[in-house]
Image (spheres, grey):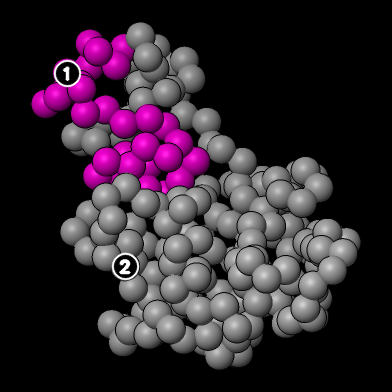
Amino acid sequence: MKPQSVGICSLCGERRSKDAMPAHLAECAPQHAPARGTGVEWIGLRVEGGGPFWLNVEAHAEATLKDLDQFVRHIWLECCGHMSAFYKAGGRSEYPMHAAVGTIFAARRIVVRYEYDFGSTTELWLRALATRTGRADKRTRVRLLARNEAPQFTCATCKQPATQICPFWDGDNPFLCAAHSGAHDCDDADCHLPVVNSPRMGVCGYTG
């Protein structure tokens, strides 16, 4: 059995498996609410980027898809100001960016697909896990609750921890340590990108 990805709660620092994190957050998130603020409905979301990459976030019901778009761009994706969109699962029917999170995710377990960059595309999948009523300050519309621990990759040459990824490599292991990055046989070693905790790693000009 493949071991579960482990994540860190951004509120208290606890480590939990991907599957166990929602239950932890159901208790932890209310304990870390602002002392003052307006009562709102929070929508708990799982955002998955494929492989080991995932986030738990919550957005209040009146936040928009544009708020979510800006959030995932900031934490995971933004490199060159590419276009992006949210789609209904299984097709190309696009949700409007002004749509409210509480409306889109009213049905629990609904899956929304997101694309950033329509050339070198990074796909994400979002689904609602839970709702709760709690306080929110005026500025926070989406907040990070937890994310996967940064995965560790090894250099294809020496098996030491990798710090670089080659965007041009066609083999099984595109990762390199700093010592072997310059000697790597590819089109342009100067275009190697850093290893980062993001599903956008190694794509376009993304550096984290």
Left or right of 36 on screen, residue 146: left
The residue at the far left in this view is: 187
- Which residue position holds label 2? 84
Q: Nearer the viewer, residue 133 or 177?
A: 133
Q: Amino acid at mark 2?
A: Ser
Locate residue 35: give its quadrant.
Answer: bottom right
| Residue 50 painted magenta | no
Residue 194 on image: x %, y %? 38, 30
Residue 139 position, x and y percent, is 63, 66
Looking at numbered disc 1 in the image, what kind of residue is underneath it?
Answer: Asp
Residue 47 placement (x, y as % from top left)? 54, 63
- Tell me the distance, in whole angstroms, between the alpha carbons under discs 1 and 2: 34 Å
User: Where 28 sits versus 201, above or below?
Assistant: below
SS category of the residue bearing label 2: strand
According to the picture, the residue beneath numbered tag 1 turns out to be 185
Look at the picture and state if 26 lies above or below 181: below
Q: At 28% from the left edge and 56% from the top edge, which residue is drawn?
A: 81
Q: Is residue 184 magenta?
A: yes
Foreground label between 1 and 2: 2
Please indicate, yes or no, whether residue 37 appears anywhere in the rendered image: yes
What residue is at 14 percent from the left and 24 percent from the top?
A: 188
Crowd band around label 1 with a 10 angstrom C-alpha radius: few (<14), some (14–19), many (20+)? few
Highlighted range, magenta = 180-208
